[in-house]
Amino acid sequence: MTLVSTPAEAAARMTGRAVVEQKSLAKGVTEVLLDSGDTVVVKRGHARNATSAEVAGLRWLGEPGAVRVPEVRGHDDEWLVTELVGGGRPTHHAAERLGRGLAALHAAGAPAFGAPPPDGPVDAWIGLAPMTNTPGEDWPRWYTEHRVLPYVRRAVDEGTLNADETAVIEQACARLPEVAGPAEPPARLHGDLWNGNVLWGAVEASLIDPAAHGGHRETDLAMLRLFGCPLLDRVLAAYQEVAPLTDGWTGRVGAHQLFPLLVHTVLFGRSYAGQAVAAARAVGR
């Protein structure tokens, strides 16, 4: 088999169309115009399992028809080609549709907390950080063992978290069973739902770059709030109309933000460590 070494070659081989032009969108991500007039996005996996995890996640999230995700046009172990989505400005209509869609997506469920998408790898990724999908039945225990402490240990090993900060996070984890709210079934999560992975259009928003797994639905919503999301009040109001959140959910936001903040601490260093510790201090307060 001829080796594919460029985004243009990947697009041509996987779509069967000639490439007219291309432009870089980000590191490892290229927009490619085909001679059919279609525009696709070509993404190069950064590590083993990265592409297979993303493909499985996109298909799993798209299965219920609740939210729009890019159609996969082709993939192999290294390259992923999808349709181009987004390209518009947020609108009230799109925000409300996103809220209702997220509620339906979460309700589609997962076999367990930590369950990977069907055919998805156990050893997956959230952004550039490794993420292991280990199933569990008890959310506070699973979240502590598989979404918080692995990144705490790595941050400690790399000197990004000190002993006092680690103790604050461990104390927050110990409080989780008491403050996590009523038990809920595993939800089907996007898993990396920060604003950069929401691409807006006038009619609807599309979700890209998932770290999909079974989890608590409040984690996706807390991540949307973490780095800012346009028209978030509209998104949440529409979500609540379809699937009301249990009492006290606003007081649990910090607990659910611990995971993404610790991932950012591992990837980007001390600038996020303080935020992670502040979120931990807020747990149960």
Image (cartoon, helix red, strand yellow):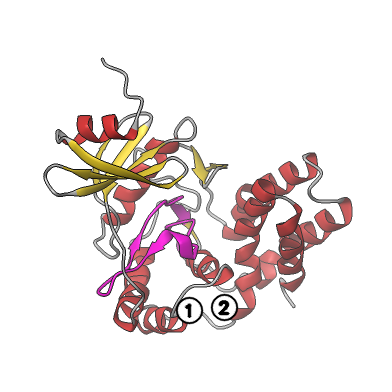
Residue at the spot x=59%, y=80% of the render?
A: 250
Mark 1 highlights which residue?
245
Residue in the image at 72% along x and 65% along y: 275
Q: Which of the numbered marks, if any, corresponds to residue 249?
A: 2
Q: Tell me which segment is drawn in magenta.
A: 185-214
Residue 91 vs residue 150, the one in the foreground: 91
Q: Secondary structure at mark 2?
A: helix
Q: Residues within 10 Å of mark 1 (few under 14, many from 20)?
A: some
Q: Are marks 1 and 2 in contact (CB under 8 Å)?
A: yes
Q: How many marks?
A: 2
Q: Is residue 115 left or right of residue 36?
A: right
Q: Amino acid at mark 1?
A: Leu
Quick one: 99 or 103, which is closer to the camera?
99
Q: Residue at x 71, y 71 (%)?
A: 283
Q: Quadrant of residue 176?
A: bottom right
Q: Residue at x 77, y 40 (%)?
A: 158
**97 vs 42: above or below:** below
Amino acid bearing label 2: Trp
Q: Is residue 13 magenta?
A: no
- In the image, residue 270 above or below residue 134: below
